[in-house]
Amino acid sequence: MNDPEVGMREKWWKKLRLGGGDVILMPVPSSYNDITQETRIRDHIGVVWYQKCGYLPERVTNRSRRVVLHFGSVNYRSVVWVNDVKVTENIGGHLPFEMEVTDLRKAGKICVTVAVNNTLTPNSIPQGKVVHYKDRQKYPEGFVTQRLNFDFFHYAGIHRSVNFYTTPFAYFTDVTVLTDVDFSSDAPIGIINFEIEFDGQTASDTFRYNVILLDENGKEVANSMSNTKLSGEMKVENPKLWWPYLSQSEEKYAYLYTLQFQLIPENDIAPQDIYNMKVGIRSLEWDQSMQNTLLINNKPLYIRGFGRHEDADIRGRGFDLAIALRDAYLMQWIGANGYRTSHYPYSEESLDIADQFGFVVIDETPAIGLSNFTNRLQKKHLKVTTELIARDKNHPSVIIWSLSNEPLTQLPTADEYFKELVQNVSMLDATRPVTFVTSQQWNNDVAVQHMDIVCVNRYAGWYGDEGHIELIERQTISEVKNWYTKFGKPVILSEYGAGALSGFHSLPSAMWTEEFEAQTLFKHFSAFDKLYGWDMLMGEMVWNFADFMTPQETIRPTGCMKGVFTRNRQPKLAAYILRQRYWQLAHKH
Ligand code: GCB
């Protein structure tokens, strides 16, 4: 671990500009870990410094607009300077942050410096701990490792895009859009409720707002003109609804309108600010009395999907549009209709893609593997969940909030912790169900009772009774039955699967071969069909979409190998088995 304070002491935001020292080139966005050949960079614990200098274009230095510096995500803690001025500090690795830098723009050279610290603590979300080794016979001075409450590689760096953008001085700060569909008459009516927030009004300025709905061809289909109120409702007759993915050729597809918000000074006709956003009109309902399911557009939803990771070779967790789209096309090919953003919020671009492809998303916070439940942690947990909802609330694809993955919810303190958290989240967004993903047993979990939907991870034939695929059907049936009988709520098997090394084969199948993974999935399917028939199951989600990197461990041969696709997104045998299944389901449900 390097001296974390040296950069601060020596004011590197000034010094780096001179170059030299231990400075190397690094791409953004990307994790820094796998770019070079050096172990010390891959396994680095502590602070790294980024700096980029350049010249802002005229539209940014132009005095008539506000300037904002936006970071898609930086993992994990960051401090940002623009030239010599510290402009922000941020904690948390998977959500955007931004700051106004209008006063700092200038025509000449401008430098942005970011110090990024990847250390996690028992009080951070997610949790981790730096372990110092004292035995000098075995370890040199300063030898540390990071113990993490999760199994995926702790990639770090500037993971998503960094942009300067501009707005007028009067501008929209936020919009909230809620859609619904009225099915009471013969022709459905789409309902769009919106709320606007804006800033920059001076005593002499008053504004009116126009809100216009455009179809995919840019044709206006509804509007709410000259509205002086900050909220409103629009009705759309015979709307094209946003449907989860079935088939591109079908009528039922993820249709997206564009909602245009215009902020117009009262005595003017030209808008000052215009904000365009994609909107999918859909209804979402859930209720225990509704045969234990979730209805989208009045139709029960059965999720055929995946747990995933934002992970790829070389770039680590750095956003790459090519990978994001390849993943979307592969999910489409396989016939999936949804995924969970295991185990942290994914990029804004990924959710746009989900809206466009018609994938339903279980949107998860980064609170993985929580191992204690204090008030302090709960505050942070609520903060990150609030930020997640604020970012993702307008996506039609987002249908469930997941508060956590596999927290230790057998501990009594988890009961109150999650009860309060759910109450708070339901106040922030009452339109979507809330869950978390448990790996505890149905008879010892104290938090699932507070959730709208039960999500369970279980690896029959892999982590229990290794190699015994003949037990999978029986064990999966009892597992889901137990949860369902206890809570009377819909159950999603949110993770199941087996590891397979691409190219490893054996007959009869054996663990780590492609045949074993394929058979594991196949054996689950017969259990799922029965459970679905008894109205107990509302989704099956394979772990994982693709192989992904983990820390070095004896049970991880260069990563987690449970992908149905390899890490470079080529199919294993299981992908073909799953494809057949998901397309059958697509036509059945
Ligand atoms: C789990 C975790 C997931 C792991 C998976 C595994 O239960 O939720 O993050 O990768 O098991 O393969 O061990």
Image: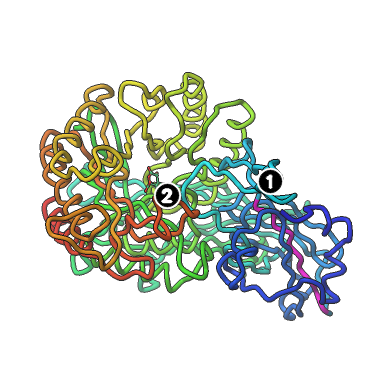
**Image position of 298 with respect to 156: above or below:** above
The residue shown at (23%, 62%) is 575
The vertical placement of 21 against 85, above or below, is below
What distance separates the C-alpha of mark 2 from that of mark 1?
A: 40 Å
Crowd around label 2: few <14 · some 14–19 · many ≥20 (10 Å): many
The residue that disc 1 covers is: 137
Q: Residue at x 25, y 25 (%)?
A: 488
The colour scheme of the drawn protein is rainbow
The residue depicted at 82 percent of the width and 70 percent of the height is 16
Tag 2 secondary structure? loop
* Residue 47 spot, x, y in % from top left: 72, 56
- Estimate how packed mark 1 is, as few (under 14), some (14 to 19) or many (20 or more) residues with alpha carbons within 10 Å: few
Dots 2, 1 in contact, CB < 8 A = no
Provide residue 568's location: percent of width, then percent of height.
38, 70
Q: Judge left or right: residue 557 versus residue 5.
A: left
Residue 111 shown in magenta = yes
Most foreground residue, 357 or 166: 357
State yes or no: residue 372 in magenta.
no
Q: Which one is in front in this view, the residue at disc 2 or the one at disc 1? A: 1
Which is nearer the N-term, disc 2 or disc 1?
Answer: 1
Instruction: Name which residue type carries label 2.
Output: Ser
560 or 565, nearer to the observer:
560
Find out if the beta carbon at label 1 lies less than 8 Å from the nearest ligand 1 atom.
Answer: no
Chief SS of the magenta region = strand
Residue at numbered disc 2: 342
Region of the chain picked out in magenta, as a range: 109-118
Tell me the residue at 61%/55% (across/down).
75
Q: Is residue 360 visible?
A: no
Q: Where does residue 233 sit, x and y in percent of width and height?
A: 43, 48
Left or right, 38 with respect to 237, comes to right
Residue 157 lies, in percent from the top left, at 62, 61
